[in-house]
Image (cartoon, rainbow, N blue to C red):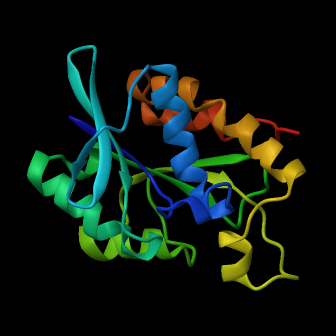
């Protein structure tokens, strides 16, 4: 069984913000598969499907970003999911807008959602897809990540998240090394 988690903040006021890139990513995949986030458990909206005989859960935690780990650990424990079968999808300030970074493990890089996930999993060794949002040091960091994106930046993010069906399908089919090789060298989407 696998758990694919898109991170974001719940509520209309956070739609189209940089911090909700993870939600947007899993939403695009769900839509491509005619899946609805129609189940609710442990403060998470989720859907499940079978892929080649394996159960896969898509999850959008409904606590605020900095409490995401509380939801992830409950799903991990309840469904008895192995750490190596968890994929976290989130925004990343240190990656250019239009680019992805896929990693096996690593530090939170100051990302509050990842910090909380590491706290609850007692590990930073979980797979992740980091969606570049660039870092505008002219703005307060919090205002920047939860602020509405200008239309030109939102268009770039839409192009990146349009790749979600392909990337998640490849995640389910390829070795993680091959997944990283395929997408970490991807050109910046403009």
Q: Quadrant of residue 126?
A: bottom left
Residue 150 in percent (x, y) is at: 85, 58
State whether residue 178 appears in this view: no
Judge by depth and name the residue closer to the eye, 47 or 182. Answer: 47
Judge by depth and name the residue closer to the eye, 72 or 82. Answer: 72
The structure residue drawn at horizontal position 65% and vertical position 71%, both measured from the top left corner, is 146
The structure residue drawn at horizontal position 20% and vertical position 59%, both measured from the top left corner, is 42
Residue 48 in percent (x, y) is at: 27, 31
The structure residue drawn at horizontal position 32% and vertical position 48%, both measured from the top left corner, is 45
- Vertical position of residue 163 compared to residue 105: above or below: above
Image-based side of 149 in relation to 86, left or right: right
Residue 76 in percent (x, y) is at: 19, 53
The quadrant of the image that shows the C terminus is top right
Task: Residue lying at the far bottom in this picture: please name it.
Answer: 140
Task: Residue lying at the far front in this picture: please name it.
Answer: 12
Q: Quadrant of residue 51?
A: top left
- Vertical position of residue 35 compared to residue 42: above or below: above
């Amino acid at each position: 069984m696998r758990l694919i988690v898109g991170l974001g903040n719940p509520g209309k006021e956070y739609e189209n913000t940089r911090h909700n890139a993870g939600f947007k990513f899993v939403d695009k995949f769900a839509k491509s598969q005619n899946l609805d986030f129609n189940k609710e458990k442990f403060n998470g909206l989720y859907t499940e499907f079978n892929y080649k005989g394996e159960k896969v859960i898509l999850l959008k935690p409904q606590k605020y970003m900095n409490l995401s780990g509380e939801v992830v650990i409950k799903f991990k424990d309840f469904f008895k999911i192995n750490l190596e079968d968890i994929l976290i999808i989130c925004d990343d300030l240190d990656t250019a807008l239009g680019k992805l970074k896929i990693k096996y493990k690593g530090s939170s890089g100051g990302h509050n959602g990842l910090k909380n996930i590491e706290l609850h999993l007692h590990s930073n060794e979980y797979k992740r897809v980091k969606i570049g949002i660039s870092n505008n040091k002219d703005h307060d960091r919090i205002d920047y990540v939860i602020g509405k994106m200008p239309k030109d930046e939102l268009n770039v993010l839409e192009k990146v998240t349009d790749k979600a069906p392909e990337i998640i399908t490849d995640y389910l089919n390829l070795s993680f090394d091959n997944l990283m090789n395929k997408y970490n060298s991807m050109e910046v989407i403009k």
